[in-house]
Image (cartoon, rainbow, N blue to C red):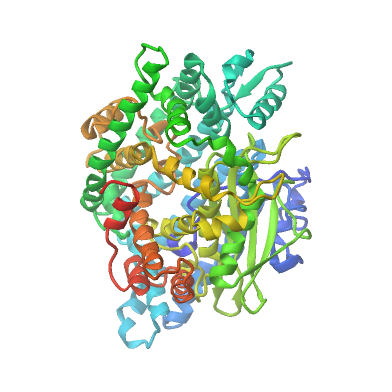
Amino acid sequence: MKIFNIMICMLAIISCRMDSKDPSRATSANALLQDWDTPFGTPPLDKIASEDYLPAFKNAMKMHREEVQRIAESAEVPTFENTVVALEQSGSMLKRVQGVFDAVQAANTNDVLKATSKEVRPLLAAHYDQIEMNKTLFDRIQKVYANRDRLGLDAEDQRLLSETHKSFVRSGVNLPDERKKRLKAINKRLATLSQQFDDNLLAETNDFDLYVTEEKDLGDLPDNFKEAAAEEAKKRGHASGWSFTLQRPSMYPFLDYSPNRAMRKKILDGYAQRANNDNEHDNKAVIEEMVRLRTERAQLLGYASHAEYVLADRMAERPQRVYDLLDKIWKPALETAERDRDLLAARMKADGIDGTFGASDWRYYVRKIREEKYNFDEDQTRPYFEANAVRDGALALATRLFGLSFKKRDDIATWHEDQQVYEVLDQEKKHLGIIYFDFYARPSKRGGAWMNEIRPQSNVDQYVTPIVTNNFNFPAPTAGAPSLLSFSQAQTVFHEFGHGLHGLLSDVKYASLSGTNVPRDFVEFPSQVIENWMAEPKVLKEYAKHYKTGEVIPDAMIKKMKQANGFDEGFRTVEYMAAAYLDMDWHTVTDTLHRATEDVERSSMGRIGLIPEILPRYRSTYFAHIAGGYSAGYYSYIWSEILDADAFKAFVDSGDVLNPQLAKKYEEMLASGGTKSGMALYKDFRGREPKIEALLQRKGFL
């Protein structure tokens, strides 16, 4: 359903200030359905009530159906303009409503918005099925497609036509009516299950509380983390002590510093067992049913498995190519992780602990090894990575590479008081777009970090500038300190900003081909390339300054940090790849038999020989990527890593990591959006297909 620009992630949720249940809001007072007299057409978030979304969705879907009906039943001879372009531009109100809802629904949820999402997801699935299985409409598209070589279309027009035609075919428009009926039922049920999965995961994550009463169990936990944990304990009704949650900014520091093995195991087990506890929030039956339905859907459409269906529209093309890629990296990664495991286990034994080294011991002893072997304490680097300073570093990099400038806007409404908004200006100081930043973790926000487009760039009748968001889950400032990030968290800022730039720099005609509307296994490439620059000393020194003294991060610290961060690459790669294998193993099944979640995980991890001291980054019941838009696609991060390592090598080999000529070529690639295939875009930049050697060398596996 790419042509309608459906957002893959159901994102952030608005904390609304209006609480009207007056049904008249469905039209007359519903800000979502009115003209927006706001700076640059940004959503009037201060005027939108939670109750506005459901009636706005229903009204917008009705409008869209009427628009599509007029196209399908037109008496005019079908042309590219009156059929394909008209369809591309239809549903503008629905896209606007959905863009706002998706952008806020995961970042600041409430009960009304949860209920809205639960009702709207299956409605949207049915709505788009009705359009993309409309045979009368498709017959008009087919006539245009059949004459495509005689229409004098430019390259982007041809791309839109081929993608539109393909989308309808892949959606089942050519199926017999009975199969269409079943396909619609499957899509509707999958939409419901996806929402249920998300709700269960959020509830399980928020319910956990590791309450610590003895300060000795905190070990050398830095003061800012102690303060945050003390504040969390108060929020949870404790008179004193410290509370640690399953949000990574809370859990990881505890695993790093607590000498209490039993407590470390308790919090890691809590994380690893999320939505897997045989209670009302259990996701095992949810993911099992989703996989069966996806397999059935793929076979209705003529594919052997869900993975085959998904990958037919990706750079990888087929499942075996994904497995071949993973297998090339898995063996050296696992061997590295096993050597590190033995080193860490020996270090634990040196502490006089005779127990078996386990997964909950890993981070604790990695920290100790880094301190002893590299004289590196990550807590000493955090003051150089204050969240806002890291943001400024990302913005400054965009200025250096692409000539962009950024102007903070306090006159644009936000969905939470912590949110920040910037206007983006191009080299000529003309308005280019808007970017929102939402940095801090809260119970109403889903985990992880992400970017989304509230409004994609387009240029059909008039130039429409993009509005994008970057969302994170960093520790919030406390009374005693600002939000101080680890090096990897600082990388995440640049990573998501890379996605943001992909949307902001887009310069194409059609919204469905703009920005991040590219193959899933290409979309992570631009974000991962940006991570390379953030660690370059000439870039690092521009923003990594001590938040108290202003001191630039010392060269000696940079050297130690790079050496120490190089240690444990085996773990990072193995835990990620284990999840990628798990995703593929779920979705390459070719029958609809019931498979128990535990059996699938046991078989998958046993086949690749995952060591028990490392857990997959995501187990099935909290693997939100595969419950949503990344099913049979989690491999795309390592696929994109090959692209990013190979691409950045071009800058390194040029002798200038900020090479302006290469930066211009890279910008042109981002500006092209999805107007070409992922490989064609990459070859335009690099002049050849990517090679894996640069990635293996960077990871230390060569």
Determine whether 594 is above or below 410 in the image. Answer: above
User: Residue 548: where, in percent of width, then height?
Assistant: 72, 44
The answer to whether residue 106 shows anywhere in this view is no
**Residue 675 falls left or right of residue 124:** left
- On the image, which quarter does residue 66 sit in? bottom right
Is 439 in front, or is 312? 439
* Residue 410 on image: x %, y %: 78, 58
Q: Nearer the viewer, residue 407 or 271?
A: 407
Relative to residue 486, is residue 540 depicted above or below?
below
Q: Quadrant of residue 615?
A: top left
Q: Position of residue 77 (x, y in %)?
A: 42, 83
Q: Residue at x 29, y 55 (%)?
A: 311
Q: Residue at x 68, y 22 (%)?
A: 233
Residue 414 on image: x %, y %: 72, 52
In this view, the residue farthest toward the front is 556
User: Camera-side residue: 559 or 633?
Assistant: 559
Q: Is residue 49 visible?
A: yes
Q: What is the number of callouts on the image?
A: 0
What residue do we see at 63% from left, 34% from top? 443
